[in-house]
Amino acid sequence: MDLNSVFPRELVTVLVVLFGSLCFALFYFRVRSWKVPFYPFYVVSQRSFKVFVENFLLLKRVGLWCEERAHTLSRALVLYGFFALFVCSVANYALNTSALTPLKPQNPLAILSDASSALVFFGGFSLLLRRLLNKRRREVTHADVWCVQALLSVFGATGALYPFFGGFVGITLYALHFVSLFLLLLVAPFTELAFLVWKGSFLIYKESRVSA
């Protein structure tokens, strides 16, 4: 059974755009409910992008938010994985190579997509284990944090594995991959992840204004 016949590419694309737009709208209205500016709108300039690369992609500042190096590395893996997966998906779609369906293993974009999903899995699962193995952290962790980290782990693992399986197993993994993504997009605006994104955009905006 072919994945394209079960999950048409156009349908999956529409759902991803729909849930992504809904996630952004929920995030926007939640931030505005805090009575603060929506700084992500202000960080699209060239100077702000430079600050983003230096402080987040190069981990110059983001590490200051983490309790130890392993925490920084786990968050970095999730950040890099999602960023790379997004780039690969856009490239796949632009090249019309079945962006949201399994590619041939020898396709470089397929290899990069699998590797990106693996990064998300290792990052999310490391964050999950970090809390599971520490009694103090377990006791103070809210349900929304468990939910996000579990969804990240499932999303990354299924995304890395489904291209290697056919038939029912491949279809099941593929479905779980996108179900976990859609659930993540729905719950993320109501978790601490929303605050971290807003805080990150605020720091980018603040530093870009100082260096102007």
Image (cartoon, rainbow, N blue to C red):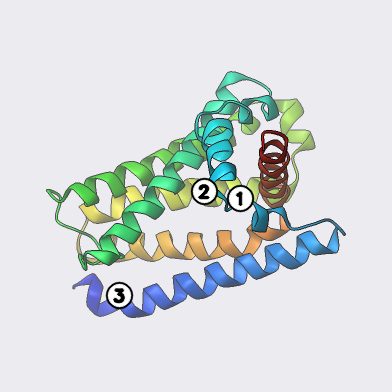
State which tag comes first along the sequence, 3 or 2: 3
Rounded to the nearest angstrom, the CA distance separating label 3 from label 2 is 23 Å
Is residue 140 left or right of 119 when viewed as pictured? right
Distance of label 1 from label 2 (alpha carbons): 6 Å
Q: Position of residue 87 (x, y in %)?
A: 36, 52
Q: Which residue position is annotated with label 1?
A: 148
Residue found at x 50% / y 40%: 78
User: Which residue is at the far left?
Assistant: 106
Dot 3: element: helix
For the view shown, which residue lies furthest in the front direction? 212
Q: Name the residue under label 3.
A: 9
Instruction: Identify the mark nearer the N-term, 3 or 1.
Output: 3
- Measuring from the top left, give residue 31's x and y in whole percent: 77, 59
Q: Using the rendered image of the protein, determine whether residue 155 is visible from the camera's viewpoint.
A: yes
Task: Report if the CB atoms under discs 3 and 1 are less than 8 Å apart.
Answer: no
**Left or right of 118 in this view: 22:** right
The CA span between labels 3 and 1 is: 26 Å
From what the image shows, is residue 176 above or below residue 70? below
Q: Do tag 1 and tag 2 residues touch (Cβ < 8 Å)?
A: yes
Q: Which amino acid does label 2 sit on?
A: Leu
Residue in the picture at 75% in, 45% down = 142
Disc 2 designates what residue?
A: 152
